[in-house]
Amino acid sequence: MAHRSARYDYGGDRYVFVEFSIDMELEQNFKTLSMAEAIKQAEITGIVEVIPSICSMLVEYDRTKIHADSLIGRLKEIERSMTHLTQIPTRIIDFPILFADPWTTECAEAFKSHHNTGQVPNIDFVAEANGYKDRESFIRALSATPYWTVMVGFTPGLPWLYPLGVSNEEAIQAPKYNRPRTWTPDRAVGLGGAFLAIYSVRNPGGYQLLGRTTNPIYDARQRHPDFKENPVLLKPGDILKWRSVTREEYDRIWAGVEDGTYRFGIKPVTVEPERYLQDPRGYTAALMGGR
Amino acid sequence: MLEVVQHGIEATVQDVYGRPGFYSQGIPPSGAQDGESLALANLLVGNDKNEAGIEITLLGPQIRFRAGHTIALTGGDLSPKINGEPAPMWEAFAVKEGDLLTFGKIVNGCRAYLAVAGGIDVPHVLGSKATYARGEIGGHEGRPLRKGDVLRVGRSKAPPEDLVGRRVRRDRIPRFTNRWELRTVIGIESYVYTDAGIETFLTTDWQVSSKIDRVGYRYTGPQLECVKRTPPFGAGSDPTNVVDSGYPVGSVHTTGPGVEPILLPNDAVSGGGFATIGTVITVDLDKVGQSKTGDLTRFARVGVEEGYRAWEERERHLTESSIEQGR
């Protein structure tokens, strides 16, 4: 594992900030998640919550139990003891998506003047900008690319997703809107830079709108059985597998989600970051192929 | 029981310490924007200091009491009245069935707090009664109060009549002004700003804009100078863009190249791609909650110890030691 020490800083009087990298690198995200897990297991008195983000994390602490400097000392010990990236127990989750759906298309139409070129639906703009000859070939490429949850947050349960098995240059990318929209439908799937995100609640936003998934990622009332334990579906490290569906399939699945009879397709899997880094493409294919 | 006869701009059920422990899932702590004032109101009426009360913003609601209660009003002076007559603040008093609480002119501050002996009886969601409206959880049905809402009240710990006349010691009543100083720990992604940019941040009287709510407080003033840099891969094209990282509650970042600092209060978004310049100490978020459009705000550089000291002092004051028997 490449050794580069993290940078530590104070986040006011109740957080410590730990930064592994200022660049987007999956290796640093793996390291962030490994260290977040190691901190939880160390059960340090005074830690309120470990809050990992893409290549950095916040550690919230109780100032009446531990001083930031002692906490930083403990965190540095943990960092030093991490000689390799640990396995990440996680899940592959099936995400049915209706591309160029009527709801995000209506939204894109309403905010046409905020868009870079005014192309509606946005998926055609993104396909063209990434050199795909048509919408269908773009959808095939996206559906073949699993996405890794690098971070959860902004609004409840919102995942930030990064493609697995492709280089930075190969990643599908798009600029954000010139001016953000004041609303976006929930369950909208958007692309900003190289990141996909799923809007968890109706919220402002500036990502290019690709489609809408049937999987809620946040259920405030915890009605659906898959939300019984927690109002949030996704955790950092979860792998999303997009499945393009027709309007009929979308409606049928959504009806099942609403009455609680449709259960999400979730498969437990263990990811070995070091093997991924040696051969991103081959390892991803093997992982998704379900050895 | 309390009945909301008219809703104001925004009134929500809040407790003092909110819902810690779920920020890694994007769920912020929430809780009163001026926790000190709500805690004092609770103490006046014999509640646990973290009990739920009502946070009333600027233009107050009208609330009818459907039974006799002992109540207390604290926080900003929004000219509270009972049946049209001025009501006391920072003091526990009795209301009768049918009494109507209204608010009027904003004398000072931005948010008033209403505590009722027994507390507002709403369910705990993820360990707290606080409302987080954007996430539609907590408080009364996960949203601000609306006309027609009826709120139940819990059982008072002390005989309500024994509480009447208790008041906050004069020297323990927070002072509300139009010029605020927020003690701030500089850091996290402050490297994105030049020394001159940070100096501008610390020496400007920032004007509180009209864009202020529980999710963000936006300030207007000069542009902060940023370091000339190419944003890292994946971050975006603006010099203040960073690869998305966590936003502490109380943190300040700018959008666009160094313009309009945004402070994130208790309903903060948990992360994003703009460079954080620093984080206001927890205790001073009470002041943010009482600042309003047109007020002036200074960010003053401090170390973490100052935050610890201020917290210890606030917690020491949020006890029976701040309460005296009146009359």
Image: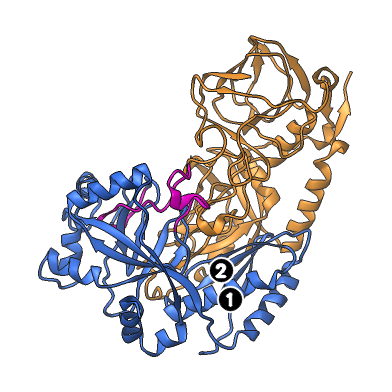
Residue with the mark numbered 2: A57
Magenta highlight range: A204-233
Mark 2 in CB contact with mark 1 (< 8 angstroms): yes
Residue A136, compared with residue B282, is above or below; it is: below
Mark 2 crowd level (few <14, some 14–19, many ≥20, 10 Å Cα): many
Instruction: Tell whether position A229 is magenta.
Output: yes
Residue A36 location (% of width, % of height): 58, 71
The residue shown at (79%, 56%) is B309
Asked whether, in this view, residue A240 is left or right of residue A128, the answer is right
Q: How many labels sit on residues?
A: 2
Residue B95 x, y percent position in the rendering: 71, 14
Q: CA distance from mark 2 to mark 1?
A: 9 Å
Residue B78 relative to residue A23: left or right: right
Quadrant for residue B87, please give it.
Answer: top right
Label disc, if present, on residue A35 of the rendered structure? 1
What shade does chain A have?
A: blue
Disc 2 vs disc 1: which is toward the camera? 1
Colour applied to chain B:
orange
- Whether B232 is drawn above or below A283: the answer is above
Which chain is mark 2 on? A
